[in-house]
Amino acid sequence: MNVVLTGSGRGIGLELARQLHAAGHTVIAGCRNPGDELLALGVTVVQGVEVTSDEGIGRLLEASPDRVDLLLNNAGVLQRNTLAELDLDSIRLQFEVNALAPVRVTRAFLGRLERGSKVAIVTSRMGSIADNTSGGHYGYRMSKAAANMGGKSLANDLGPRGVAVVMLHPGFVKTAMTGFNGNWGPAEAAAGLLARIEELTPSTSGGFWHAEGPQLPW
Ligand SMILES: NC(=O)c1ccc[n+]([C@@H]2O[C@H](COP(=O)([O-])OP(=O)(O)OC[C@H]3O[C@@H](n4cnc5c(N)ncnc54)[C@H](OP(=O)(O)O)[C@@H]3O)[C@@H](O)[C@H]2O)c1
């Protein structure tokens, strides 16, 4: 299968690239700046893929095959915003990366998605309104909730073309985003995400799932 991925330079994205490549898939790994680990994998690395710019997204499109079986929107950013220190530029940035980019990237790739293709968006349980019992994190929570809504609309819009869309929470993962705290590492998280993507069918399109398996409430 041909897979296109964003945010593959480190963390969960790097592991997704590694595991997809090891499974024999063709991986087009978009990143802003590749680290040595990504360069050593043997996948097609596309640098300068800034997901908030048409130029960056265009670079990824240019390097991608005519048919994309899986478009994996993984790039994301977390900045801590409290009510006392409401940095609006920080919140806007998180909306650009977490919420708008997956829709922008998917729209750019529409011509490459065919019947049977899948789109995955790595969102977060922190975007679940039902799960929000602790507040704060305005930019991250709001942008991930918006990402879920964007993904649901994509699922509805792309359903008639036979393209399935899934929103995924990777768990609490030990990456730079969490200061390397978490319940599991990027390798386990990536394996869980890929298992959920494998299970995705047109009839389950538009859902929100934990990488460990259970469906999550909006
Ligand atoms: N770690 C967790 O516990 C956790 C929990 C829930 C959801 N998630 C989600 O999982 C995904 C991967 O996160 P991670 O934990 O692997 O974090 P990470 O190590 O911080 O990696 C984030 C990735 O996103 C890329 N990125 C950020 N802003 C970008 C932009 N404007 N354009 C292009 N790429 C950009 C980064 O690229 P650079 O290297 O160039 O900065 C990096 O490759 C994110 O969507 C995150 O929100 C993570």
Image: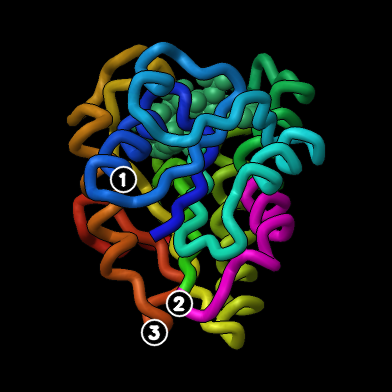
Q: Is residue 77 visible?
A: no
Could you tell me residue 94's position as x and y percent?
Answer: 65, 32
- Work out how far the residue at label 1 is from the one at label 3, CA to CA, in angstroms: 24 Å
Q: Amino acid at mark 2?
A: Gly
Q: Is residue 173 magenta?
A: no
Residue stretch in magenta = 101-116
Tag on residue 203? 3
- Residue 96 point in image, percent of width and height: 72, 37
Q: Coloured how? A: rainbow
Q: Is residue 194 visible?
A: yes
Q: Callout 3 environment at 10 Å: few (<14), some (14 to 19), or many (20+)?
A: few
Q: Secondary structure at mark 2?
A: loop
User: Which residue carries the number 1 mark?
Assistant: 20
Image point (40%, 12%), residue name: 36
Q: Earlier in the sequence, mark 1 or mark 3?
A: 1
On the rendered structure, is 81 left or right of 213?
A: right
Q: Earlier in the sequence, mark 3 or mark 2?
A: 2
Task: Single out the mark in the foreground, 1 or 3.
Answer: 1
**Amino acid carrying mark 1 in the image:** Leu
Q: Is residue 3 above or below residue 201?
A: above
Q: Position of residue 142 (x, y in %)?
A: 61, 42
Name the residue located 36 percent from the left edge and 77 percent from the top edge: 201
Examine the residues drawn in magenta and state their main secondary structure. Answer: helix
Q: CA distance from mark 2 to mark 1?
A: 18 Å
| Quarter assignment of residue 19 | top left
> What number is the disc on residue 116?
2
Kind of element beneath mark 1: helix
Residue 43's mark?
none
- Within 8 Å: ligand 1 and the Cβ of disc 2? no
